[in-house]
Image (tube, rainbow, N blue to C red):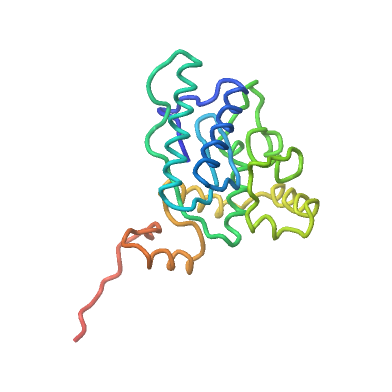
């Protein structure tokens, strides 16, 4: 996730969204990073990616940020950065949670009370043009998106996958899942079930999950 500085707008017209997508595609191809989904909001850019290395991910996000700032500043005769700081990222469990994240992206315009460039209020994910929702329901094919296994497993044919995805998006996500994804993105916590989080935690000394509220349990010395 890239966020705008001080709540400023990242997009002022449709052309800005198109330019952002162009930069996303270019930097992902250049660094060999797979793009699985996206959501472009007034003040945020959300991407679901599979990089070959951590360095490739950083290069995509840094290059994207610099390219768009240069375009935006030239287009609107301004100077300075657009971003509130470094991008935020999290590791997502492949089974099930990738699908949840894609649907979360579809509903971000609603959750963020975002409005389109002409001022229309977004009432459902399908009303908003600047997410990968249109691709996954078959309304507009996007050759830059690499479907994740979570999407392939929705059906045996493109039509079956699109129909199943549309039904899942229509049903939405419960508040607990939404809160879990939001917390993971904001805090950089690993997103997945307990066993997946434990597996990732075993590979690093950094805490990868938010601590439970309350005081830690008292450890007593053995007699």
Count of picture labels: 0
Q: Quadrant of residue 122?
A: top right
Question: In which image quadrant can residue 108 be found?
Answer: top right
Q: Position of residue 120 (x, y in %)?
A: 66, 25
Give the side of residue 190 with respect to residue 121, left or right.
Answer: left
Q: Depth check: give the residue in front, 133 or 71.
A: 71
Q: Residue 101 placed where, x, y %?
A: 58, 50
Residue at point 45% right, 28% down?
A: 7
Placement of the C terminus among the 4 image quadrants: bottom left
Q: Position of residue 65 (x, y in %)?
A: 45, 32
* For residue 155, above or below residue 30: below
Q: Residue at x 30, y 69 (%)?
A: 217
- Looking at the picture, how far across and down is residue 161, in whole percent? 75, 53
| The furthest residue to the bottom | 223
Q: Quadrant of residue 83?
A: top left
| Residue located 63% across and 38% down the image | 131
Residue nearest the observer in this picture, 138 or 195: 138
Residue at image x 42%, y 37%?
A: 62
**Horizontal relation, residue 222 to residue 165: left or right:** left
- Residue reaching furthest top? 77
């Amino acid at each position: 996730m890239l966020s705008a500085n001080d709540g400023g707008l990242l997009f002022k017209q449709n052309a800005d969204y198109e330019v952002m997508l162009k930069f996303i595609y270019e930097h992902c191809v250049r660094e060999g990073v797979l793009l699985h989904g996206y959501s472009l909001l007034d003040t945020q850019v959300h991407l679901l990616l599979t990089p070959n290395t951590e360095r490739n991910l950083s290069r995509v996000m840094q290059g994207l940020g610099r390219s768009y700032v240069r375009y935006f500043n030239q287009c609107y005769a301004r100077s300075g950065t657009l971003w509130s700081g470094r991008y935020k990222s999290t590791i997502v469990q492949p089974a099930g949670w990738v699908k949840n994240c894609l649907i979360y992206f579809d509903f971000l315009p609603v959750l963020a009370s975002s409005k389109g460039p002409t001022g229309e209020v977004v009432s459902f994910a399908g009303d908003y043009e600047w997410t990968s929702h249109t691709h996954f329901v078959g309304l507009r094919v996007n050759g830059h998106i690499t479907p994740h296994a979570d999407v392939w497993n929705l059906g045996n044919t493109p039509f079956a996958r699109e129909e199943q995805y549309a039904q899942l998006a229509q049903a939405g996500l419960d508040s607990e899942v939404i809160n879990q994804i939001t917390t993971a993105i904001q805090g950089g916590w690993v997103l997945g079930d307990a066993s997946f989080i434990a597996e990732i935690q075993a590979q690093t000394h950094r805490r990868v999950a938010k601590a439970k509220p309350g005081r830690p349990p008292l450890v007593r010395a053995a007699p």
